[in-house]
Image (tube, helix red, strand yellow):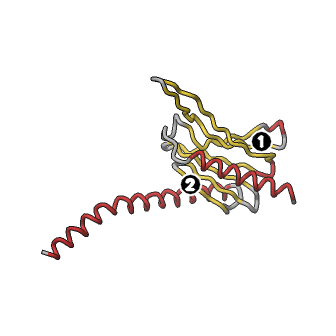
Amino acid sequence: MDLQTTLIGVFIALLFIFPFVYMNQAAKLRSRKALGHLRNLALQHQSDIGMFEYMSGFSCGLSTNEKKFFAMKKHGTDVISYQVDLTEINHCSLNNINRSVSGSGSSAIVTDSIELVFHHTDKAAGTTVVTVYNAEQDNPTLAGELQFAEKWQKTISGLLQHGRKK
């Protein structure tokens, strides 16, 4: 009787633990695949990836030696890739496009898009916009994309400031 109870308990525990382990392994696999694609993009531009991060279909990385920023955004089967030479960038800003929606006595702020905007030192070149989140194409519920973009904006701005001091 004790062996049977123990086996049932172990089986039930494994039944509850397995989905979490599976989801964790799947997330690691997606991250490794994204890093591989990002490294291939960097190799196409004779560079490497020194710092890397992946979040829900968006991956980005920095090559600190050559001062290049690489990013890839996946929309279904389409992949949009970005390459920004940071030596040609004056500063990086965050563009959080949102709107207020009101209904039935309450209002809420809805985020439509989150973008990293690279402002070139040559004003004629304008800006390069890297879309981190778009409500029309991504999950309508934010899952840390704003914090992700803020972190990368601060990292890139710090790298640009450090480059100017030299």
Taking the spot 34% from the left edge, 63% from the top edge, the residue there is: 17
Taking the spot 80% from the left edge, 38% from the top edge, the residue there is: 125
Q: In which quarter of the image is residue 129?
A: top right
Q: Which residue type carries mark 1?
A: His
Mark 2 lies on a secondary structure that is strand
Mark 2 burial class by Cα count in 10 Å: few <14, some 14-19, many 20+:
many
In the picture, measured across the screen, residue 136 lies left or right of residue 70, that is left
Taking the spot 38% from the left edge, 59% from the top edge, the residue there is: 20
In the picture, measured across the screen, residue 156 lies left or right of residue 108, that is right
Q: Quadrant of residue 104?
A: top left
Placement of the N terminus among the 4 image quadrants: bottom left
Picture layout, residue 51 above or below residue 75:
below
Return the residue found at the far top: 104
x, y percent for residue 127: 75, 39
In the picture, measured across the screen, residue 81 lies left or right of residue 136, that is right
Q: Give the distance between the C-alpha atoms of the residues marked 1 and 2, in whole angstroms.
A: 24 Å
53 or 35, which is in the foreground?
53
Tell me the residue that label 1 is attached to.
119
29 or 11, which is in the foreground?
11
Q: Which residue type carries mark 2?
A: Tyr
x, y percent for residue 133: 57, 41
Mark 1 lies on a secondary structure that is strand
63 or 2, which is in the foreground?
2
Looking at the rendered structure, the number of numbered marks drawn on it comes to: 2
Picture layout, residue 159 above or below residue 124:
below
Return the residue found at the far left: 1
- In the rendered structure, find residue 54 and report the number of the disc placed on it: 2
